[in-house]
Amino acid sequence: LETKIFSDFLLSVPLLVVGFISSTINNQSYCFNQSFTPAVFQLNNQIASVSIKMKTATSPYRRLVSFLFTIISLSSLANVIADEYNHKYSKGDPVMFYVHKVGPYANPQEAYNYYSIPYCAPRNEEIPSNKKAEHGFFNQVRSNSIGEYIGGHALRHSGHKVQYLPEGNKYSEECTSTAPLTEQDAQKFKLAAENTWVYQMYLDDLPVWGVVGEMMAADKSDKENVKPFVYTKRTLFIKYNADRIIEVELLSDPKSLVEVKAGVQLKFQTDFEWQATQQAFHSRFDKYLDQPFFKHHIHWFSIFNSFMMVLFLMGLVALILVRTLRRDYARYGIGSNLDVEEAYSDDEEEMLDENGKPLMDEPLIKGSGGAGNEDSGWKQVHGDVFRAPAFLPVVAAIIGTGWQLIVLTLGVILFALAGPIHGEVHEDRGEMQHAVLYCYCLSSVVAGYISGSYFKLYNSTKNIGRGKTSTTGNSTWQLTMFLTVMLLPSLCVSILSVLNGIALVYGTVNYIPFVVIVKLFFIWILLSVPLCVVGTLAGRHAKIQNSSSSGCLTSSEFPCRVNAIARPIPEDVPFHGKPMNLIPFAGLLSFGSIFIELYYVLTSLWNYKVYHVYGFLLAVYGILAIVVSMTTIIVVYFCLNAENYLWQWTALASGGSTAGYVILYSIYYFLFKTSMSGFIQTMFYFGYMSLIALTLGILSGTIAHFSASKFVRTIFRNVKVD
């Protein structure tokens, strides 16, 4: 009996699975044409009798067999839908034709549902007369991924019945408005013509664009009296190679322009013409890449210019390290370690550099014990330079988030560069958004570890001089963990929530549905947050050797001990010793190394370009890291020389100041490089640019802090302190 029941499972489970999936597909008609699934639907008749046998099975058998045959059935189902996703067709196969959006050409984010314009649906069996039939495709939402929704790609079925290689390689569909245009419909067409509205469609994942209408004079003799006209006929030229679609072009017939006014009944026509080509399938997206624009000689020159800036800054830093610091070492080292009598011995050539110049700026004062050479300079702050910065949990959270952004950015760029292996990111809608989500979640452990270890390291110095020792169990580490978890999501959610609310109120396609938001929340709460917590705990328990005694800290991480009493910071310092005077110059140099590439990125975001030169982006990313590091080292050195030991916040501000110039450049770009207008587009533009600037500022500030930390540790490690 048990053997018979098990054999019944082998027959019934796949029928149940396929029947359930086919029923789901039947309800969601955007995934399949009915011609794909007649054989599958016949299986539904067997489900009732087979399911009775399923109930007699034991639970372990049912779970095991269900799991195995679910995989087998899904694999078989994948072969059924291979045409749409593998882009292979046979003669007569249906080809999915989706509509995306329509809106002003100058405002890419002000995009509405295609059928918000009173276009009529084509007349075929897919569009019954009532337009509400169970199996109609018209305006049905396609099964879109999370990445597609984030990117604003909420595709809907056009209602056109497109077949691969129809008879005669030509096919035409037309429709007539069911009623004359109302005044409201006429105003919609007029608005579209006045503002040059364009629509976007997808056929076999290839995008095409068309213009809704134009403003022109009805009478050629009276060119000043312009009226709205709409295109009523368009032709899609579909080029194919064997069983694959290679290229799609859309042309609107100028002869089909019809004046739009209330009471007019419009007749729309769409022609599909198939043409053979020898072009390879892998190159079908090349026409969208605009190689002359992205690989212009100015682009190459900007990389060379940035590289020369790197060499200059590296030379300047080398000058500081080799010459200036050497003189400092000689002054401090001789002044504090040589006997005064030896300093005035006959062996004076040892106090000269290779050019015969004295290593010491001032002669030693006999009997002073060398103290006269240490009246000022960066060595004076050796007892405070490793003191914990103000608002330590905030600094730790910023640095942890910054390292997460560094890893995330590098991971996404490398993923895009590996396009020839897994598929170019510009060929699949939402793939780049998916890459960002994955890298963000996985890099959360980096944020937690860096913030936890940084907090533990500097938290040891907070209680010096208070008569108690610091412990890693300090309750403020929980605040650090909370800030690390919430910092980046709070920035993103606060900005994107406002933009999503605007998209909802105005009914644009950029609105992210509530279900998608819930999915994103669960991804964050179930994956990103636990990884960040695990990273924070690992960083908190990282091994750091320290011992506290006599109010001073000695750590293997710190070259110098921290004094019990903080040293006052001098106020009367020269211009180049004040951080607020140096930070803007550091940000300007950093911005100067990336602004050309920033122009190309912004053009891709706001002007219908497809960014694909990720090799340039990786090079500029490396150049930015080097420039930020070099400029921050210079700023920190000048501040330490002015006996200002608050280098942590100075370094963060030095690198983060790049964000201020990005905001200023975005304003310039908005005013002089685009024709954007209107409340929706303005809010979306500055909302996204603010988010880009903030994340870039955190990333650059973290790189700056890392470089400054290495520099400070290096110079104080080589100083002998009494």
Image (tube, helix red, strand yellow):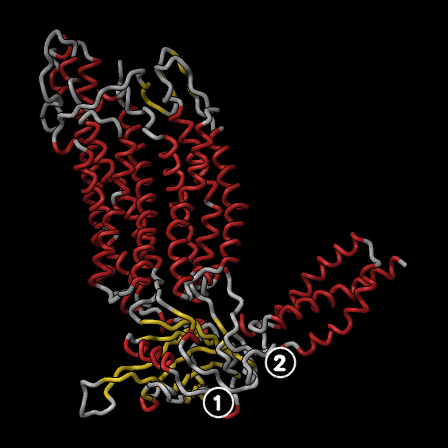
User: Looking at the image, which is closer to me, 460 or 664?
Assistant: 664
Which residue is rendered at x = 50% and y = 57% of the image? 514
Q: Is residue 348 left or right of residue 38?
A: left
Which residue is rendered at x = 57% and y = 71% of the image? 31
Which residue is rendered at x = 41% and y = 87% of the image? 180
- Amino acid on which disc 2 is placed: Ser
Q: Percent position (x, y) of residue 57?
A: 83, 57
Q: Percent position (x, y) of residue 410?
A: 39, 49
Comes first in the chain, label 2 or label 1? 2
Give the CA distance from mark 2 to mark 1. 19 Å
Q: Percent position (x, y) of residue 206?
A: 43, 73
Q: Quadrant of the C terminus?
A: top left
Q: Is residue 367 above or below residue 79?
A: above
User: Looking at the image, which is closer to me, 145 or 411?
Assistant: 145
| Residue carrying label 2 | 35
The label number, if any, that marks residue 171 in the structure image: 1
Q: Could you say which quadrant of the image residue 383 lies in?
A: top left
Which residue is rendered at x = 26% and y = 18% of the image? 720
- Amino acid on which disc 1 is placed: Tyr
**Observer able to see residue 91:** no
Q: Percent position (x, y) of residue 709?
A: 31, 32
